[in-house]
Image (tube, grey):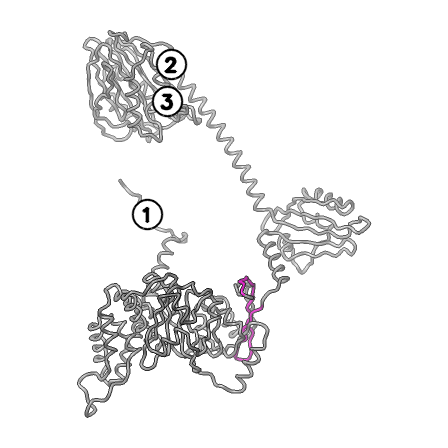
Amino acid sequence: MTSEPVTPAQPGAAPDLVELAKIVARQRAELDRLRDQAATAAVMERAKGAVMALTGCPVDAAGELLLQRAKAARHTLLEECWITLGTLVPAPPAPGGASDSPGVEAHDSGAAALESDAPDDVNAALARLGQALVRVMTPQDLARCLLEHLGPDMGADAVLIYARRPDGGLGLVGHAGIDDRLAAQWCQVPPLSGMAALDALRAGEPRWLEDFAADERQYLLIGDPPDRWRSRAWLPVAAAGPAEVCIGVLRGRAGVFTSRDRAHLRGVTRLCAGRLRAFDTPPERDADAATDAVQALFEALPVAAMLLTPLRAATGETEDFRVEAATAQVGDLLGRTGEEPAGRRLLELRPALTAEPLWQGCLQVLATGKAYEGEPFAHEEVVAGVAELSVYTARVAPLGDALVVSWIRHGSSDRQEQRLADLQRLGNLGWANWNLATQEASWSTQVFSLVGRDPAHGPVRLPEIPELALPEDTPALTRAIGELVHGGRPFDVPFRIRTSGGIRHLRLVAEAVADRHGTPVEVHGFVQDMTARRRAELALVESERAILNQHDVLQAERTLASRLQHALLPMSNRPVHLAGLRVEVAYLPAQSGVHVGGDWFSAIELPDGDALLVVGDVAGHGVDAVATMAQLRFTAKGMVITGSSLTGALARLNTLLLHSRDSHATATMVLARYEPRRRRLVWAQAGHPPPLLLRDGEAQYLPRPHGMLLGAAATPVYQEAECRLDPGDRLILYTDGLVEHPPDSIDRGLEQLAEAVAAPHGDGPASLGPLLARMLPDERRDDVCVVDVRVPGSRDG
């Protein structure tokens, strides 16, 4: 098998989009890898720095200490760095102020031992979590990361992260697996008894809620309804001091947390302690009267709005914005329901904002000083406990060095206008009105675009509309407008106009509005661009015409080929006798399609008294196949009559096909010569099915001698085979149309032919007709040619 070489892309050729996509995917994967590598290195360096600050040891010793601890606790180095960042505390000074080893307290021995004894799959899961934490930038990200980590492992359905507030209560700083409505309901938890999260923080120990009925009596459970989660775990995050953060893991299924689950969750909290400590705390804002006044002003605004000040990098480029003041609705629009945006960084609230148009709008306003208005977008919000879809538009306006961002909620009339504009754009149409009393006209913007008219020139009066059309279409349009104005008859008229882009097909639909006397006083309607549809219709008509022409050509070719075939293959209505043999032939053309095949036969008596029996099949259909068939049929007979052997004749016919005008033509053939004196049959074949011999009621195929189909190779090898025919024998030569009937395989067809020939029959010698009726389906896709040879001397004689 050979493959065609890939042709190099020519200069200016279109790039392979698949290859470009693969390149982009590889580059993105490499960029993600480099980012993870940089973040991982930053965590490790921070852990080394913490060890160095507490012990005074050099950087190499700090790194070695971290590595030793990781090996002892069966952690990865990255896990050990997260744990170190969350649990390092100053060690008591050594006597004399010196120490031979790093002076840092070891981790909690009980917890470390618990983790080191954890199953290998738990250790592997914690290692994966440690790697994933380098991509976590906010507590909200941490909640999502934990849910992705714990969901498949222990069936966690939600994760909540609470932080202790100065008043002793809890504030929801991160959540995943719950909707915004529930998050807003439980965003602030007062310092009351009966809260499992507060109980876990106060005791410094996890609370495992595994019996819903008992837990419901003891605690106030989060949920709407609470039985949405049948088992829960609240785990305080151990740090270098009192626990200030509690992580809740909520499961929909009932049941206990196994010892494996508990070891896993304790390991999770130890890793999260370092991550929570590593979050960059937003700088505190100066609490002054001006700031308070601005915040009070924004809280009184009836719309969602916020005041932003740019945060610039050393290069002067804006890398983020600080939210100086914000209304209560902003948190919901930024996807942080229940959180207080004021005083925080914008990208902390919404890290994906840099990929959204609003971010570019803010940068554009900073650069140009001109206001920005974005495209309308849909936002789902909860109103009175019901989720509904609202449409907003974001606007950005400059205010000195700051920006005011506001979101305008569209009312029903605004939405109707937007829907009408969308309808005109998607339908490629526009509306038009004409006042017949004042002769005033008004068009939508889309109509000006459709007719190619500058809006500065204004709309065209109704009587002047026909002047826009081509001269051939003007009369029909003029007549329709006249009948509308004088008789109030509506119309739907297609017409064409000439624009800079070529001929455009338009459609004008209009109706009149009459006064109380029945006199038309106003006309309204729409103009629609039908160019694409008209072009498709014309292309369809042209395609149908081409199909009809092609059908006529094919039909004429079939008629010609059929006539040639009948002239070349004269059929006898009765059996013939050749060299003591009784020979019956049948040729049945295909019943489907418009092509005629190249099947043929020959059954003649040679000058020396022998009989020549031939069947063949040329690949393809039509006049070319019939011409090739005639060439092979007459050439084969001529060569055998003049003394050529069967194999020699096949070799010369192969050469003839290779050097014919159609060098790709191929054919199969069986040549057989019968000597009556010795009752000897000698035969050769070229890629053709073997003859079938029926003897004493048993049918079997003759073993095929070697032979390749004609026209396939320059130096094929052909061999002869021979057999003796006894009185009463029956020999069937055929083309593949007799035995090949998809979807059945040709092997199945050969079995069916043998069964049909061997089956008992009472119709006497003339049994070829019933055989064909039994073998052939009602619809044939290929020609069938059969030569039925019988040796007299028995009851068939």
Residue 71 % position (x, y)? 20, 72
- Which kind of residue does numbered mark 3 sit on? Leu
- Which kind of residue does numbered mark 2 sit on? Pro
SS state under label 2 = loop
SS state under label 1 = loop
Residue 636 % position (x, y)? 29, 19
Residue 266 % position (x, y)? 30, 71
Q: In this view, does 80 lie above or below 570?
A: below
Which residue: 79% across, 54% down? Answer: 437
Q: Main secondary structure of the magenta part?
A: strand
Question: From the viewer's perspective, is 462 left or right of 732?
Answer: right
Give the residues drawn in magenta, as a range.
Answer: 385-408
Question: From the viewer's perspective, is 514 left or right of 596?
Answer: right
Residue 708: name its quadrant. top left
- Residue assigned mark 3: 776
SS state under label 3 = loop
How far apart are labels 3 and 1 at the CA level? Answer: 46 Å
Residue 137: name its quadrant. bottom left
Query: How many C-alpha atoms fall within 10 Å of the one at disc 1: few (<14), some, or many (≥20)?
Result: few
- Which kind of residue does numbered mark 1 sit on? Val
- Residue assigned mark 2: 570
Question: From the viewer's perspective, is 530 left or right of 10?
Answer: right
Residue 678 visible here: yes
Image quadrant containing the C terminus: top left
For the view shown, which residue lies furthest in the bottom direction?
96
For the view shown, which residue lies furthest in the left direction?
100
